[in-house]
Amino acid sequence: MNIIIAGDGEVGFHLAKMLSGENHNITIVDPHQELLKMIETHTDLMTITGDSTSISVLEQANVRRADLLISVVHDEKVNIITCILGKKLGAKRTIARINNTEYLTAENRELMRSLGIESMVCPERIASKELVKLLNQTAATEIFDFSEGRLSLFLIKLDEKALVLNQSLNQIAAEHPKLNFRAVAIHRNNKTIIPKGSDEFKVGDLAYVITRPDGIDALLKLGGKQKQEIRNVMIVGGGRIGRKTARRIERDMNVKLIEMDKERCLSLIDQLEHTLIINADARDIELLEDEGIRNMDAFIAVTNDSETNILTCLLAQRFGVKRVIPLIENIDYIDISQSIGIDTIINKKLITASYIVRFTMDAEVTSIKCLSGIDAEVLEFVVKPGAYVTRRPINRIDIPKGSIIGGIVRGMQSFIAVGDFQIQEGDKVVIFALPEAISKVQDLFN
């Protein structure tokens, strides 16, 4: 596939790096010459320095032969113009990153399509939804739903309370034969393991599990986790993510939002009816104490500065807040954050990538989750007529090394993948895959 990525920083570079291993011809258009020099040094990607709204720059990038034009510049106006021009100049499909959710109404989506923008991604909106989900399911470090929640991916960090410690998957299955979930990966000592029946769980493991809705309670029990009711929430940062999150939860929870910018605070007062807005610096320890940080059930830090978000979350943990979630834009900080005790994070680059990568697949993919902290993805494939996976039961399918089938959605029903299950045409199949396995996994469904 010929892909053009218009970016102005790390989002475009991260997306290009993800796609570069899939035999695509990728061209990056970016105004920052120094960044492009660095990219050229470390990759074989083609780069063009310039403005993606320039017709001559798009033509230089050979937009007429582009199968996919992706514009993920921070300024949504640039993304919209880039995609409109790119489509008119011959790009087969366009995707624009946008910030204004007004464009996402059904009527306005149709308007954008008529202009040449087939798809739009709003990372802030997705991030807000993920935050609300994490507040409602406090026992999990990461959650992602497939097929409207008929199957879900849960990430659980195992501590001394876990009932499965030092037990193999075979032992657990023998003791609990009717479990409605399946472990698809274990992340241990910076290494990701696709578990076999003889593999055991250890303290500190990050367990990735595909579960049905009716398997969640048993999953949490075996993982030694208890649901914690969230009533009092403190949010740091009144930007789009902070504002959208507060708006979603303010009727059900007691919300305090701390924002440094006075003008933004005045704007937030008009937009949030039941949220207490505080104009202050959240790095001020005395302020946090005065505002009742010790009584908070959850603390969310979503400023534009990753260091501030990490620092304030560490302060919240020190005051006894059990659920802390920072927005971390620098992907290199994710491992560091997890090593110092911040297990749950939000990252807009991964959110953007999760939305866009499925459009580059040969097989039909309805959902992708690019996981934080490990180099892996969970994908939901639609089974085509005559696909290899329909020819024999799961235990006789030659699954590519580095991947595992977690579950199947058939109509309104969901199933956990077991040995003798027969996948059928039209099913949706959820697979955990390491990067080297993804291209081979696609072949199972074509």
Image (cartoon, rainbow, N blue to C red):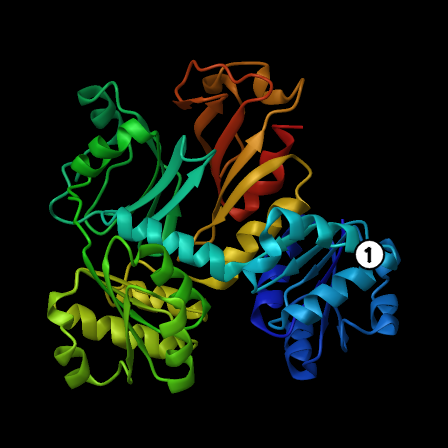
- Residue 64 x %, y %: 88, 57
Residue at x-position 66% and y-position 42%: 361
Residue shown at 86% from the left, 71% from the top: 55
Placement of 357 over or under 326, stated as above or below? above
Residue name at image x 44 percent, y 62 percent: 347
Position of residue 339 relative to residue 149, above or below, is below
Q: Nearer the viewer, residue 159 or 83?
A: 83
Task: Identify the residue shown where x is 37% and y is 60%.
Answer: 247
Q: Is residue 183 left or right of residue 218?
A: right
**Label 1: how many Cα within 10 Å (few below 14, some 14–19, many 20+):** many
Name the quadrant containing residue 44.
bottom right
User: Residue 38, relative to residue 423: is it above or below?
Assistant: below
Residue 2 location in percent, x, y?
78, 53
Where's residue 175, x and y in %?
17, 21
Residue matched to label 1: 87
Q: Would residue 51 be found to the left or right of residue 174 on screen?
A: right
- Name the secondary structure under disc 1: helix
330, 316: nearer the viewer: 316
Left or right for 444, reference 412: right
Which quadrant is the C terminus positioned in? top right
Asked if residue 44 shows in the view, the reply is: no
Amino acid bearing label 1: Lys
Label tally: 1
x%, y% of residue 425?
Answer: 60, 18
Q: Can the viewer see residue 242?
A: yes
In the picture, residue 242 is in which quadrant? bottom left
